[in-house]
Image (cartoon, helix red, strand yellow):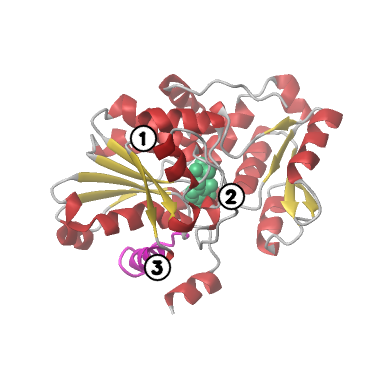
Amino acid sequence: MSTPCTPPTYEDVTQAAALLQGIAHRTPVLTSSTLNDCLGAQVFFKCENLQRIGAFKFRGGYNAVARLTPEQRRAGVVAFSSGNHAQAVALASRLLGVSATIVMPLDAPAAKKAATRGYGARVIEYDRLTQDREAIAREFVERDGLSLIPPFDHPHVMAGQGTAVKELIEEVGPLDELYVPLGGGGLLSGSLLSAAALAPQCRVFGVEPEAGNDGQQSFRSGQIVRIDPPASIADGALTQALGKLTFSVISTLAHDILTVKDATLVSALRFFAERMKIVVEPTGCLGAAAVFDQGQAVRGKRIGVVLSGGNIDLAALGGYLS
Ligand SMILES: *Cc1c(COP(=O)(O)O)cnc(C)c1O
């Protein structure tokens, strides 16, 4: 499969921002004076739960499809995902007039399959236990000439994801610390490029579920560590390993990788629903949960937090809160 193999630069993030102008939402930055008083800090939440498709992934998906050549666009794209990346690639493709094929597990939630089809994508189902989704996607690439849009380890995906933090810092000014949810590292690596360019003093933390701390192990040991499939309610951050490109950016620019417990994610879900009147999915709460864990250590600081997504069904949310 032909994926470009050098990491993006901040220049790529600014190009992505120009392509996304007027197409992605410029999401709001919300604050809570209750929280600020409690921590003695200023916390700025970048609300990507309010982005198109309900998560930041629209940014990277759109940028990657938009940057294909006219010939590649005519052939179409393929992606494999059971989550937000599927909908991101499906919507981006529809907006750009490109046909999209999304490889999803047979047992993916019906609502997610329906949403993906609703954006006009062809959904190909596979059996998680007996079939390899990457092999299925590769067949579409080799046989039909489709371009694979990977969920994180791709320069145009990473650059697109970086536009959220670019907007955040341009709007609120320099930050002392920034907390970013971490799965495969597309969001964190893009955020690092923007922070390094716009707020070079800012210390940037990636945040993972405690049960799936492959990123922390990789960052601290200096090489990519692969773990067994983790179990956490943060279902968008259950990747087993960082990508080559995302790791190269993260290992040079991140300050540290932190982990949080599922119980703290639940406290954060409750805080957002009850106090801020917004729905944030468990994975989207990772950065906020790490700030709650810091407690008084953030006193006096200006803190940025990316709320990465809001796709959770209300029955599941109710289950966590009851
Ligand atoms: C995909 C996803 C993440 C993790 O992003 P990576 O780029 O894989 O690190 C975090 N939050 C949400 C809501 C996501 O959909």
> SS for tag 2?
helix
Residue 127's spot in the image, x, y percent? 79, 56
* Distance between the alpha carbons at the discs numbered 1 and 2: 24 Å
Q: Earlier in the sequence, mark 2 or mark 3?
A: 2
Q: Is residue 56 visible?
A: no
* Residue kind at label 1, given as amino acid type: Ala
Of the residues shown, which amino acid type is indicated by label 3? Answer: Ala
Nearer the camera: disc 2 or disc 3: 3
- Residue positioned 30% across, 35% down in the render: 169
Q: Is mark 2 within 8 Å of ligand 1?
A: yes
The answer to whether 321 is drawn above or below residue 223 in the figure is: below
Label 1 vs 2, first from the N-terminus:
2
Find residue 123 and report its horizontal and vertical position in percent.
77, 49
Vertical side of 96 occupied by 10: above or below: above
Residue displayed at 25% across by 55% down: 294
Q: Tell whether position 92 is magenta.
A: no
Q: Which quadrant of the figure has residue 145?
A: top right
Q: Which residue is mark 2?
A: 84
Which portion, as a residue range, is magenta? 264-281
Horizontal and vertical percent position of residue 200: 27, 27
Q: Tell me, yes or no, if residue 233 can be seen here.
A: yes
Tell me the CA gap for discs 1 and 3.
25 Å
Disc 2 packing (10 Å; few <14; some 14–19; many ≥20): many
The circle on residue 263 is 3
Which residue is identified by label 1?
A: 254
Secondary structure of the residue carrying tag 3 is: helix
